[in-house]
């Protein structure tokens, strides 16, 4: 009898211990935040991994009970895969990196993304994130304004120049106006010898998108940001005098053989080799070139510098554009509260500083003060004081228009004499296929 | 007591059930992974679905009308026709020539392996290899042209609209030739030697023996080779995507790359599905008509 009773006590105690253990275990377990991103290799990956480690330390320090789990997918595959993952319960991440602009708009329109406006307001992000980025991060879905992608890092488009070639050509100061740029280009061209040809500009347009940088800046500088934005909303025509004028200027440069030949054979990074080897002096490119040139052994500030795309019409507002990476949250995310905590630490100034310094990208919060090297600090100076900041052509225009437009830019690049015909064909295609709808 | 015919019937039913039991699983898999998605694609081709989310509207034949009014669609179709034209002649002709050579030479195994090696590489690998060969400044092709004194022919093969398509097709032909050769070699080995010997005794020259006797007897092999090359030429995608993505300015675009871009770059899944359906119908019609015509006159020996 006594034996049976003690056995019972033992069993009950054992069950109690298991239950208490399990309960404590559950309460101690951290809520996972599944985060997908498209920086799977190189210093971009390292920068993000380090930034996330710091973010995790900050979460642990405040006992948030959140664990950040990173998952990477290669850049091109990511564009396809993340859309499939984000719209299915069970595979949906809690946060995923995504390009601000038309691509986010498409996912928001399809009802896949969580509106983060409340999160933005509750966390007072108006006072943390640069105001020009908020304007860029607003999306209109079914007539209602919302925020669907929280900016995390950006790159601005500038002109990078080869200091050795500028010095050899006797160019004393960085060009500030269009005429100064043309004059510098002529001086660079005159450096050519029979053995070695030197070109004022280089660009690798194998993947099409670097060609848009010329179109964008020439249009911004001649027709202004309002016209440019309206053009990419379908309210203006690609055959309008404003577009024709900008593209004519571009075609003049191309006809003068100012660009390193066979641009369509090279990616942007392959084309930078000609810059490194002193065969080309300038490139209009996003600030990620800094890491590329450093990797090729060039010293920022000593071997290369940057300047803002020159003023063409002083009466037109001057500003910048570029690409913004942000974090979006699927509506089907399983751990939304934990994901909000994660966003908070990702926007922490120290995390932003670490990420920007390691990656060579620009931060999004005004409190962060990254310790940039010589060239990045110049980019940052322009960026932090820009009166406006928009997205690249292919991030602003709806995807089918961006695709057709990029094809047209290649057509112009390869046959600058026929730019009018190319623009007419583009406009006709947009209308025939209703590409803005 | 069963009668003999009842026993036979029972055996027959049992045999049919056995056959069905073996077929059920593959048919289910085929329905789930081939027919099902194809039907889905057909349904989506009548919608304006973006490919994301679950909302869409029915648009009837609008996507098909857009396709038949679209310059890029006809450009891709034209490029596919060029692919087919080159693919049914060059790799087939080369494959047959190589097979005949290898068949009559010593060291056949070694040669067969050499010619078959490209076939073991994926189109992605072939695409990357040939992209390097075609590089304007450091590519082997331009360097070789320089070396043999044909430097004036040098060009940026993949970035010149006039050469991009043909440059991609040549890379694909390089791979496809190995397959044609192996198929023809198998065909040659299966031919009745006495018929060819008889032609020799009758005084036919070696060319006459090949053209009048051997080649007609290879008709079923030719049907297989041509069907395979035609199907590949019509659904060419990976090598084009890797080498040019259809550029520059759509010069090398084919229906496969156009469909991909509409589905995944432009978020026009409805339109992309319509293009895929058109491609499917083209392949079906071309291949079925071709096989029906070729096999209706099957040679037996």
Image (tube, grey):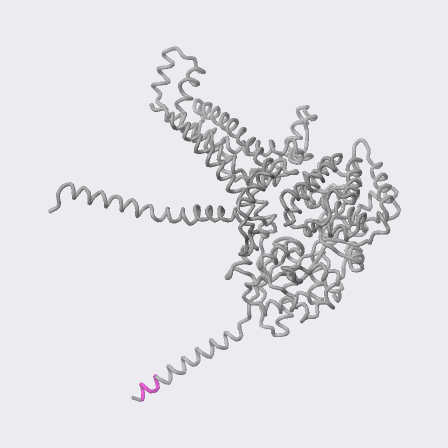
Asked whether the viewer can see residue A363, the reply is no
Q: Main secondary structure of the magenta part?
A: helix
**Nearest the camera: B174 or B138?**
B174
> Taking A8 as reference, is B93 left or right?
right
Q: In the rendering, at what x and y percent does residue A422 appear?
A: 71, 38
Q: Closest to the observer: B164 or A409?
A: A409
For image coordinates 61% across by 41% down, the residue present is B245
Tell me which residue sits at (62%, 37%) in the image. Answer: B71
Residue A344 magenta-drawn? no
Quadrant (top left, top right, bottom left, bottom right) of the C terminus of chain B? top left
x and y, in percent, of residue A251 in the image? 77, 38
Name the residue rendered at 55%, 64% in the picture: A333
Number of numbered discs = 0
Horizontal relation, residue A99 to residue B61: left or right: right
Answer left or right for B198 relative to B70.
left
Asked which quadrant contains residue A19, the reply is bottom left
* Residue A5 among magenta residues: yes
Q: Where residue B236 appears, x then y in whole percent?
A: 53, 37
Pinpoint residue A139: horizontal percent, then vertical percent: 67, 59
Where, by quadrant of the figure, is residue A330 drawn?
bottom right
B2 in relation to B155, above or below: below
Asked if B236 appears above or below A75 in the picture, the reply is above
Instruction: Tell which residue pokes out farthest to the top in this image.
Output: B203
Return the residue nearer the eye: A216 or B117: A216
Q: Give the extent of the magenta segment.
A: A2-7
Q: Give the residue furthest to the front.
A: B60
* Residue farthest bottom in this picture: A2
Asked which quadrant contains residue A418, the reply is top right
Q: Nearer the viewer, residue A167 or A234?
A: A234
* Residue A388 seen in the current view: yes
């Amino acid at each position: 009898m006594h034996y049976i009773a003690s056995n019972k006590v033992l069993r009950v105690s054992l069950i109690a211990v298991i239950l208490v253990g399990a309960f404590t275990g559950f309460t101690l377990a951290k809520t996972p935040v599944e985060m997908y991103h498209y920086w799977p290799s190189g210093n971009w990956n390292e920068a993000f991994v380090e930034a996330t480690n710091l973010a995790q330390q900050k979460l642990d320090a405040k006992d948030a009970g959140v664990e950040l789990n990173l998952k990477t997918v290669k850049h091109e595959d990511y564009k396809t895969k993340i859309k499939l993952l984000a719209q299915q319960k069970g595979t949906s991440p809690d946060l995923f990196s995504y390009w601000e602009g038309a691509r986010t708009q498409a996912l928001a329109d399809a009802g896949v993304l969580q509106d983060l406006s409340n999160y933005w307001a509750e966390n007072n992000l108006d006072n943390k994130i640069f105001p020009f980025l908020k304007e860029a991060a607003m999306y209109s879905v079914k007539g209602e304004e919302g925020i669907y992608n929280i900016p995390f890092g950006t790159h601005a488009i500038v002109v990078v120049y080869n200091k050795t070639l500028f010095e050899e050509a006797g160019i004393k100061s960085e060009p500030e106006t269009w005429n100064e740029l043309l004059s510098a280009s002529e001086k660079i061209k005159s450096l050519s010898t029979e053995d070695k040809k030197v070109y004022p500009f280089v660009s690798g347009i194998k993947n099409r998108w670097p060609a848009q940088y010329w179109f964008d800046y020439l249009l911004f500088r001649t027709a202004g940001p309002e016209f440019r934005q309206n053009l990419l909303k379908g309210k203006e025509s690609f055959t309008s005098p404003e577009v024709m004028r900008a593209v004519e200027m571009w075609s003049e440069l191309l006809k003068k053989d100012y660009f390193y030949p066979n641009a369509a054979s090279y990616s942007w990074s392959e084309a930078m080799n000609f810059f490194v080897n002193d065969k080309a002096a300038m490139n209009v490119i996003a600030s990620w070139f800094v890491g590329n040139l450093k990797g090729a052994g060039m010293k920022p500030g000593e071997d290369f510098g940057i300047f803002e795309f020159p003023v063409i019409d002083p009466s037109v507002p001057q500003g910048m554009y570029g690409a913004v990476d942000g974090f979006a949250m699927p509506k089907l995310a399983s751990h939304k509260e934990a994901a909000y905590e994660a966003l908070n630490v990702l926007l922490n100034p120290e995390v932003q500083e670490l990420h920007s310094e390691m990656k060579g990208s620009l931060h999004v919060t005004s409190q962060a003060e990254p310790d940039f090297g010589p060239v990045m600090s110049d980019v940052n100076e322009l960026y932090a004081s820009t009166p406006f900041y928009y997205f690249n052509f292919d991030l602003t225009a709806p995807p089918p228009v961006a695709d057709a437009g990029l094809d047209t830019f290649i057509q112009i690049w390869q046959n600058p004499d026929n730019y009018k015909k190319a623009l007419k064909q583009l406009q006709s295609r947009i209308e025939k296929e209703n590409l803005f709808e | 007591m069963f009668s003999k015919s009842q026993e036979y019937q029972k055996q027959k039913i049992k045999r049919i059930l056995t056959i069905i039991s073996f077929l059920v699983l593959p048919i289910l898999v085929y329905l789930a992974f081939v027919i099902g998605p194809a039907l889905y694609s057909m349904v989506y081709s009548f919608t304006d679905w973006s490919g994301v989310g679950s909302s869409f509207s029915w648009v009837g034949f609008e996507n098909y009308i857009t396709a038949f009014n679209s310059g890029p669609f006809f450009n891709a179709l034209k490029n596919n026709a060029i692919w087919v034209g080159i693919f049914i002649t060059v790799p087939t002709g080369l494959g047959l020539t190589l097979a005949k050579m290898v068949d009559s030479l010593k060291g056949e195994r070694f040669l067969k392996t050499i010619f078959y090696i490209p076939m073991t590489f994926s189109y992605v690998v072939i695409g990357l290899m040939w992209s390097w060969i075609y590089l304007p400044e450091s590519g082997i092709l331009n360097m070789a042209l320089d070396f043999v004194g044909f430097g004036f022919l040098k060009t940026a093969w993949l970035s010149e609209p006039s050469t991009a398509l043909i440059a991609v097709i040549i890379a694909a032909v390089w791979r496809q030739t190995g397959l044609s050769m192996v198929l023809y070699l198998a065909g040659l080995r299966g031919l009745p030697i006495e018929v060819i010997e008889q032609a020799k005794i009758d005084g036919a020259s070696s060319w006459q023996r090949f053209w009048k006797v051997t080649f007609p007897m290879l008709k079923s092999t030719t049907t297989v080779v041509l069907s395979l090359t035609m199907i590949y030429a019509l659904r060419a995608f990976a090598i084009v995507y890797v080498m040019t993505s259809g550029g520059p300015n759509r010069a090398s675009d084919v229906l496969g790359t156009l469909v991909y871009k509409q589905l995944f770059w432009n978020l026009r899944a409805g339109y992309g599905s319509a293009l895929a359906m058109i491609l499917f119908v083209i392949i079906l019609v071309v291949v079925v008509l071709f096989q029906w015509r070729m096999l209706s006159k099957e040679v037996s020996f």
